[in-house]
Image (cartoon, rainbow, N blue to C red):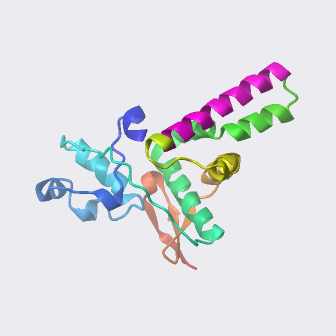
């Protein structure tokens, strides 16, 4: 979505293939070594040279098993803080990706029944489209998955808010302060 909506290549570190001459043109790995989101910064730098950045349309199925909830939270919070520093005000658009929270807020506000019905219908449509997409990708959602979607929305809303708070993240046993563009602020790295 980032590549399509904002016109920025959203490069992920585990899937980069790069010609050596292009890497040399942007200043080598040293040009990105001060950034926590070095993969994203690399994609932008390569694009700025005029070189084509191609993103794979393949869907890679990944799963994590037996991760403590604290580790899952820390990872998603770190990503949210990075998205704030990369996207600026555009990050606020992520608030619209938590429909169950918006419906709950609508209900709590004492909204008219018609508004609640419309909100419920939109939420059901979103979850239906998500289930259809999962089915098309060969990974249909079971009843338990569907029941957990509102909980996932609540978690996503919490992560969204956490992304707006603070600038320090935990990364590989260190606490790092992030600046604009996810630049690692030197002199502000703390031992855990």
Task: Identify the residue at the far left of this view.
Answer: 21
Question: Disc count in the image?
Answer: 0
x, y percent for residue 137: 43, 44
Q: Is residue 69 left or right of residue 17?
A: right
Task: Identify the residue at the far bottom of this view.
Answer: 191
Task: Identify the residue at the far right of this view.
Answer: 110
Query: Where 173 falls versus 170 (above or below)?
Result: below
Q: Is residue 122 left or right of residue 41?
A: right
Q: Can residue 65 be seen here?
A: yes
Q: Is residue 122 magenta?
A: yes
Quadrant (top left/top right/bottom left/bottom right) for the N terminus: top left
Q: Nearer the viewer, residue 108 or 37?
A: 108
Q: Is residue 140 magenta?
A: no
Query: Where 23 falls versus 140 (above or below)?
Result: below
Which quadrant of the view contains residue 103? top right
Which segment is the magenta one?
Answer: 113-134
Residue at 21%, 54% in the rendered image: 26
Residue at 73%, 30% in the rendered image: 120
């Amino acid at each position: 979505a980032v590549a399509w909506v904002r016109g920025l290549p959203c490069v992920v570190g585990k899937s980069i293939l790069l010609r050596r001459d292009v890497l040399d043109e942007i200043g080598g790995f040293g040009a990105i070594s001060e950034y926590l989101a070095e993969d994203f910064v690399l994609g932008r730098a390569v694009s700025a040279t005029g070189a084509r950045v191609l993103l794979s349309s393949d869907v890679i199925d990944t799963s994590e098993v037996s991760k403590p909830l604290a580790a899952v939270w820390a990872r998603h919070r770190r990503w949210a803080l990075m998205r704030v520093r990369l996207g600026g005000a555009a990050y606020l658009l992520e608030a619209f990706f938590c429909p169950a929270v918006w419906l709950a807020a609508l209900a709590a506000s004492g909204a008219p029944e018609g508004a609640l019905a419309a909100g419920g219908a939109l939420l059901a449509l979103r979850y239906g489209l998500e289930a259809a997409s999962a089915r098309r990708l060969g990974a249909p959602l079971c009843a338990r998955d569907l029941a957990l979607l509102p909980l996932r929305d609540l978690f996503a809303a919490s992560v969204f808010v956490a992304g707006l708070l603070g600038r320090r993240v935990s990364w590989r046993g260190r606490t790092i302060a992030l600046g604009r563009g996810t630049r690692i602020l030197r002199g502000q790295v703390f031992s855990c």
